[in-house]
Amino acid sequence: MVIEEINIEELLREFVVEQQDLFLNDVSEQAISHHLATKLASCFSGWHVDCEYNRNGNDVKKLMYALSDHGRVTSRNVVPDIIIHKRMTPVNLLAIEVKKSTNIENSFKDLAKLEAFKVQLLYQHTLFVRFLAGAHGTGVADVVWR
């Protein structure tokens, strides 16, 4: 199954409704990522859907990118929120970074990291998702495909 066969944005909206208590209670982004990965796994049979998977083959996953628009590009160990891939192969489908509206951190770093996943590790697609959480309510605030 390829990503074009799945309506990811509809899946995200369904996910928010199904897991509304996660967002209302403003749980950690790691907890949200775990539950989102579980939902994605049901749509991507034959693929590995992993949270915080820090390996590229047997090596620690590293990418070259800047943390800010004024920062210098350096090599960093990376731990993506969610990836859909074939472990121990160079076959990489989708890298996802998850943020909540209550996390005021600038998204530049996440978007730069996703671009590096696409260029350096040849991920076919990358996705940045910001969910509404806490006092902001529930929903999908931003979806950025790269």
Image: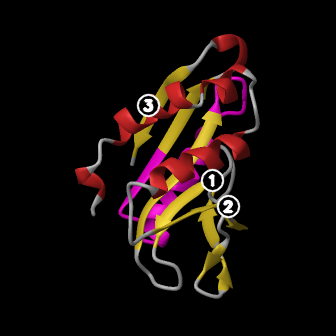
Image: 133 above or below 45 = above
The residue where tag 1 is placed is 81
Q: Find out whether residue 124 is within the magenta segment.
A: yes
Q: Are marks 2 and 1 in contact (CB under 8 Å)?
A: yes
Frontmost residue, 40 versus 96 = 40
At which x and y percent is residue 9? 37, 35
The residue where tag 2 is placed is 52
* Residue 46 seen: yes
Q: Nearer the viewer, mark 1 or mark 3?
A: 3
Determine the secondary structure under disc 2. Answer: loop
For the residue marked with disc 1, what is the amino acid? Asp
* Residue 69 seen: no
For the residue marked with disc 2, what is the amino acid? Glu
The residue drawn where x is 62% and y is 13% is 137
Residue 14 numbered tag? 3
Relative side of 26 to 91, left or right: right
First-in-chain label (2 vs 3): 3
